[in-house]
Image: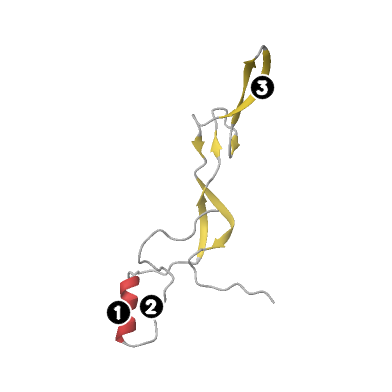
Amino acid sequence: MGASGSKARGLWPFASAAGGGGPEAAGAEQALVRPRSRAVPPFVFTRRGSMFYDEDGDLAHEFYEETIVTKNGQKRAKLRRVHKNLIPQGIVKLDPPRIHVDFPVILYEV
């Protein structure tokens, strides 16, 4: 469920600039990492919302409407999922911030 990592190829934003090793290690690091002028924080502060607004302004993951079906002279109510006229929720602020999926850290509890 959700994002499994960054979509950019060959980009590792959390790599350290001061890495040990010889010139071959530096060449390998340059192949994977683009130089950046500023450090990237390990936290995610926003995410894309997974809910939708309908015409009435209600917010939900899914919307259904009740339809009456007549079968063999009997009226029966059915729920039909609504796909039209839904507006995505947009960007949602996370409180508290989350750790980025690609950040190389091991969470340890004693």
The correct choice, above or below, for 25 with respect to 36 in the image is: below
The amino acid on which the numbered mark 2 sits, given as a three-letter code, is: Ala
Between label 3 and label 1, give the one nearer the viewer: 3
Q: Mark 1: which secondary structure?
A: helix
The x and y percentages for residue 51 are 55, 41
**Residue 37's image quarter?**
bottom left
Q: Residue furthest front?
A: 72
- On residue 17, which mark appears? 2
Badge 3 or badge 1: first in the primary sequence: 1
The amino acid on which the numbered mark 3 sits, given as a three-letter code, is: Ala
Q: Residue furthest top?
A: 73
Badge 2 or badge 1: first in the primary sequence: 2
Query: Residue, x 52% and y 41% (percent of image)?
Result: 89
The C terminus: image quadrant: bottom right
- On residue 77, which mark appears? 3
The x and y percentages for residue 43 are 52, 63
Taking 43 as reference, is 38 left or right?
left
Q: Which residue is the site of mark 1?
A: 27
Taking 24 as reference, is 84 left or right?
right
